[in-house]
Image (tube, rainbow, N blue to C red):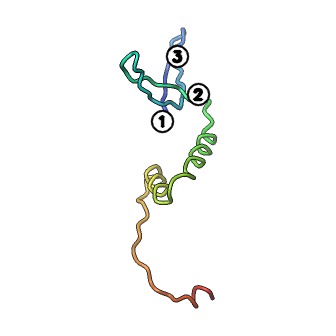
Amino acid sequence: MYIRTIQRKNKDGSVVRYVQLAHNYWDSAAGQSRAKVIYNFGREDELDTEGLRRLIRSVARYLGPQEVLKLEAHYSGDAPLSFVSSRALGGAWVLN
């Protein structure tokens, strides 16, 4: 699945873009891959970005913590977190 944008030109010459969630499948009758639109988010200029963020958080629940950190770092531009070292502190200290 992927997010795609399509555009069309109005009679007055303005261009309108639409955002869609799509999935490719193989059409054996035609012998080629086709895109199936799963959900149409609507016009790009009227896009509900908060709704997209909720969708991403919902899908991220099924990923492991490492994958979520990698995705957050990739899209925020920060370097991903890495494990540097650990120290044994003892059970009594932790329970205290």
Label ID, residue 40: 2
Q: Is residue 67 above or below residue 91?
A: above
Task: Work out which quarter of the rendered image holds the C terminus and state it.
Answer: bottom right
Label ID, residue 1: 1
What residue is shown with label 3? 14
Which residue is located at x 47 percent, y 35 percent?
2
How far apart marks 2 and 3 lie (CA) works out to 21 Å
How far apart marks 1 and 2 lie (CA) works out to 13 Å
Crowding at mark 3 (Cα within 10 Å: few <14, some 14-19, many 20+): few
Q: Which amino acid, by three-letter code, is at mark 1?
A: Met
> Residue 81: x percent and y percent?
43, 64
> Residue 35: x percent and y percent?
46, 25
- N-terminal of the pair, mark 2 or mark 3, is 3
Q: Is residue 22 above or below residue 54?
A: above
Q: Which amino acid, by three-letter code, is at mark 3?
A: Ser
- N-terminal of the pair, mark 3 or mark 1, is 1
Crowding at mark 2 (Cα within 10 Å: few <14, some 14-19, many 20+): some
